[in-house]
Image (cartoon, rainbow, N blue to C red):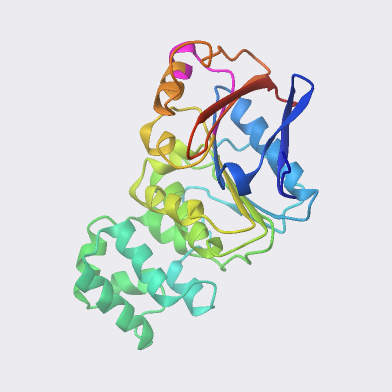
């Protein structure tokens, strides 16, 4: 079989190399494994895409992804500024104004009418940041204030980061899953149109747990030519397993492996091989078939 230039070698099987090819298998790859295995696999893919001059955007909840090679490093710490205020980013042209308003809508539960009013006030120059929106006399301010905290205030403060070609969003130092989800959504919105980019997330299930994080997943998994998304997780949950795209199963508990096989429609029997340490099962679909290939992943 002829693979595209963005294919990544997974392992050798029966004398032939097995590849993950986004152009053929699907542009979102889901990786399931326990302990350090998902993070190791994510780094393996990032290294391969760097070799072909792809931009790399990584969201890391474990705090273990190497920082070398990144133009922009955004650290999320409770009570400290990040500059990830969507309205300020829109002022600087890193987001469009309506996207900024819908981010505020998602995070604070505005309805459509209030979101439109916030957008109109942004266009009129009446609101230039989320803290300004909170202090305004608009009706949307009342709704935002219901869940807005001092942690939010600190989070939005600071100089907006430059969104370079290679971005690491370091989420391992925050205890607030809410702030992690907001950071995930804001940066995802900022990079959602990028091509020649690999976007990697670890742990995808943790970030998708929040409303903001769940809204970020469709932004980075929408198929785009020349873009690849890698979602790594320790958790076999429906919100990740049911996304379109192939799955790479690493070492995990036998019952978890069984759930992943089942969700992917792999029939019981010899196609469901137990994956041991250092091994992987690559599950992918075509319009006609379900396929599973096994081998040792070079992590």
Closer to the camera, 272 or 239? 272
> Residue at horizontal 49%, vertical 42%?
174
User: In the figure, 201 relative to 247: above or below?
Assistant: below
Quadrant (top left/top right/bottom left/bottom right) for the C terminus: top right
Q: Residue furthest bottom?
A: 124
Tell me the residue at 58%/18% (across/down).
Answer: 251
Residue 193 makes an appearance in the image: yes
- Left or right: 138 in relation to 73: left
Q: Is residue 250 magenta?
A: yes
How many badges with numbers are in the image? 0
Could you say which quadrant of the image residue 39 lies in? top right
In the image, 198 versus 122, the foreground residue is 198
Which residue sits at x=40%, y=27%?
Answer: 263
The residue lying at 63 percent from left, 67 percent from top is 162
User: Residue 92: x and y, percent?
Assistant: 54, 78
Residue 26 place in picture, x, y as percent: 55, 45
Q: Is residue 261 above or below residue 75?
A: above
Q: Which residues are magenta?
A: 247-257
Q: Quadrant of residue 237?
A: top left
Q: Is residue 114 above or below residue 143?
A: below
Residue 290 on image: x %, y %: 50, 29
Q: Quadrant of the N terminus?
A: top right
| Position of residue 29 in the picture relative to residue 155 (left or right) | right
* Placement of 120 over or under 50, stated as above or below: below
The magenta stretch spans residue 38: no
């Amino acid at each position: 079989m002829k693979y595209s230039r963005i294919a990544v070698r997974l392992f050798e099987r029966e004398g032939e190399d097995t590849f993950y090819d986004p152009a053929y298998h699907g542009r979102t790859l889901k990786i399931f494994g326990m302990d350090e295995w998902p993070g190791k696999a994510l780094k393996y893919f990032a290294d391969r895409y760097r070799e072909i001059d792809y931009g790399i955007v990584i969201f890391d909840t474990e705090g273990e992804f190497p920082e070398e090679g990144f133009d922009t490093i955004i650290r999320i710490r409770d009570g400290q500024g990040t500059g990830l205020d969507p309205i300020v980013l829109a002022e600087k042209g890193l987001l469009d104004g309506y996207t900024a308003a819908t981010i505020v809508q998602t995070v604070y539960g505005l309805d459509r009418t209030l979101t439109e009013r916030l957008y109109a006030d942004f266009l009129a120059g009446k609101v230039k940041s989320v803290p300004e929106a909170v202090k305004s006399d608009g009706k949307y301010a009342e709704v935002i204030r219901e869940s807005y905290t001092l942690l939010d205030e600190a989070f939005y403060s600071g100089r907006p980061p430059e969104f370079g070609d290679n971005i690491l969003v370091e989420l391992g130092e925050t205890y607030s899953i809410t702030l992690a989800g907001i950071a995930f959504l804001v940066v995802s919105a900022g990079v959602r149109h990028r091509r020649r980019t690999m976007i990697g997330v670890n742990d995808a299930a943790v970030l998708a747990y929040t409303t903001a994080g769940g809204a970020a997943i469709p932004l980075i998994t929408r198929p785009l030519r020349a873009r690849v998304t890698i979602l790594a997780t320790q958790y076999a949950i429906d919100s990740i397993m049911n996304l379109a795209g192939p799955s790479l199963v690493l070492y995990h508990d036998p019952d978890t492996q069984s759930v992943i096989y089942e969700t992917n429609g792999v029939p019981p029997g010899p196609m469901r091989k137990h994956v041991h340490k250092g091994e992987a099962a690559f599950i992918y679909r075509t319009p006609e078939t379900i396929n599973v290939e096994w081998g040792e992943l070079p992590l």
